[in-house]
Image: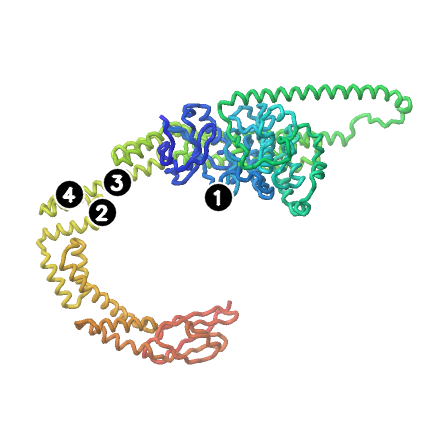
Amino acid sequence: MTIQVQPGTKLCGRFVALEKLGAGGYGEVWRARDEIRDADIALKILYAQFVESEAAWQVFVREFTLTSRLNHPGVLRVFEPLRAPDAVVLPMTLAAGGDLRQMRGASYTKILPLLIDIAAALEHAHARRIVHRDLKPSNVLLDGAGRPLLADFGAGAAEGDDTNGPPGSPFSASPQQLAGEPARPADDIYGLGALAYELLSGYPPFYPAFDARKIATEPVPRLKSVKPIPPRLELLVSWMLAKQGRERPPSMRHVADEMSAVLQDTLGFEDVASVTAAESVAVLGAPADNPTPGVYADDTLPVVETVRELDEIDPDILPRVDELRAQVLREQRSSTRKRNWIIAAVLVVITGGVSLLLPKLASQQKVDVATLNVPVGPTEADVAAEKRAGELTSKHTELSKRVLELDSRAAAQWAGEEFAVVRKTLDEVGGDLERRKFEDVAAPLEVLDRKLAELESRTPVALAAQLTEGKRALGVGEFENSRQAFDTALKIEPGNNEATEGLGKVAAASGVLPTLSDAENAEASKDLVRAQMLFAEVLKANPGNVAATDGLQRVRRAMSENEFNNEMGAGLSALAGGRLAEARTHLEKARALRPDSTEVTAALQRVGDTSSGRSLAEIEQKAARLVAEERWTEALAIFDEQLARDPSLQFAIAGKAAVQPRAELGSRLQALIDRPERLSEENVRAEADRLLSRARALPKIGPVIRSQVSRLELLLPTFNQPVMLALESDNATEVAIQRVGFLGAFDRRQVELKPGRYTVTGKRAGFRDVRREITVSPGQGEQIIVVRCMEPI
């Protein structure tokens, strides 16, 4: 049963809808909170009428499957789609910067850097034989820093795949794509050109009237940019929008390089920004040569903000798209027939000309056959060259078989760019062999041989990595990622037992999400027994599931907390009623549940005190005796102990209030007496004076504090009198005393220092530094300190 999505709606037991971001032909996009990942994400949600549609579900699966093969910062990360009774969703990374629609009509200097980044992401996808096929402003998102993220591979396909996915925007689709031909990188070059056209002019090619015949047969209308652009950029966009794929730039790398070159030429373009329309037409061809009329009758540009967005295709018009594809095929065949008739006519003319000219040419020339140097057979050099060509061709064939073997073992997934470079190099070498450029292929073949050997040696590592990823994804509930990892492992090593077992676990665990959702709901409603049972069921089907493991631990902690509170309450109630045996039983159970609880320890102590007949009166008398003897710390410990057991005891409250200040004063006085060297510091002596003032102001001074005051009064003056210190050196070591100053080099020198701790250092060129810590005590005789650097470096 599907539900109406509103802010706060929880979907699939883990996603909480927060804010609607947009809507399309198949569903809505919401900002949502993923409670398992503990992060905000973007969430595609199918409309209710498509929830049961297997085709709609396959769109999500296609997008996830394609993007999971990509690992590029310019590609939006998509997570595993989920199908639950209440919703079908596709989670993905949240892009906080909106999309490229906001860039329509911007300066080309702002647009080109974004297009270069998009081209890099598409180059990465093409290297993995993936074609996007739906490049439009709403499918390029921006992150918080304004960097583009290529999104929505739902209409994408593997290179060469002729399976028609859902249609993308008709204005960015190449003629070959509209005709239903297999996916090729050239489709994306056309799509990127259409995207550039739309961002620069404010509207896509052939907008607003979509006409398949025009797209198939007529040139793209002249680009009318909102702001001035260099002619080189206009030529590049026109090149990318060529009708035939072979007439477009050869690769996305070429497109990116051309765009970078345009940016590098920006300064020169700005210097001549007043280029006339006539000059621009001269570069691109006269308007009369363009058989396609402009989209608008006058030269005014449309208001960019009012261009109707045609990013989503309503599912109801899918049959019309098929009709458009058929129409494009008919137009292409018609164009081909016309071209064939023209070629035939030209051949007729050429043939006639040749028949008229050859007799005349023959009559004017006589050739002496005897003088011709006609070779009678192949030379030794020819034989050697042919032998070398055969060897190189055989080597290429052998390497091709090894590449096919690596390809069958999913090298495109685990070797990525490296394997793509190998395949590209292999194709280039094959082309050179066909063109008989044998001198250019020997070195690349050796490099390929070494690179293939390296890749082949890495298959065990790749296998281990896929198995590890499969286990990790299975543990956190990412079942599609886990399945793909184990599938890849089986491609690397067919029949691998661990991967086979992993796929079995994925199949068994893929149905645990509803049970996991029920367990979380039971936990939220405080039905802890049921929640514990359901979490255990999930772990039985999917051992190691992180969400179930964490949930089970939470439930067990909550159940233990409840049991502890019950036992503790029963024990205190029995203690208050004088049922000491019963109280001890309940409190011992509470301590078994929480051994470190001070609350349990205090209650058991009260039971013990009551059992042994100790009375509060006895404790109070003992504390009073300690106070009379000025044993403040011991008395304070008794008061604290009793208050920990019963915070309402009045004698303990009053006793602590009276004793604590004196205990603190006595402790601080004794600390100064125990460590008199601290009195050498000015701030410590000031603190001693303040403590003495507090002690003298007490209403009643006992013998202990009086003794402490007297001892401290005797110590203070001695720590303010300097003591003579003798330093001996070698007249080469430079001596310094921290907090005193630099003394220089000498044989013997006397200094006066107040009691305290000092650091004496010595330095000498070519010798290791020396450092000594000394203590100057009050009243001591002259102390001799030797400082010499004696260890050579």
Quadrant of res 544: top left
Q: Position of residue 634 (x, y in %)?
A: 18, 63
First in sequence, mark 1 or 2: give its number. 1
| Residue labelled with disc 3 | 558
Q: Residue at x 47, y 40 (%)?
A: 95
Judging depth in this view, the residue of 13 and 439 nearest the camera is 13
389 to 772, vertically: above or below: above
695 to 151, vertically: above or below: below
| Residue labelled with disc 4 | 570
| Residue labelled with disc 2 | 595
Residue type pointed to by label 2:
Pro
Residue type pointed to by label 4:
Ala
Crowding near the residue tagged with mark 4, few <14, some 14–19, many ≥20 C-alpha atoms within 10 Å: some
| Residue labelled with disc 1 | 144
Which circle, 2 or 3, is nearer the viewer?
A: 3
Q: Position of residue 546 (x, y in %)?
A: 36, 37
Q: CA distance from mark 2 to mark 4?
A: 17 Å
**Horizontal side of residue 442 vs 488, given as left or right:** right
Judging depth in this view, the residue of 581 and 478 nearest the camera is 478
**Tag 2 secondary structure:** loop
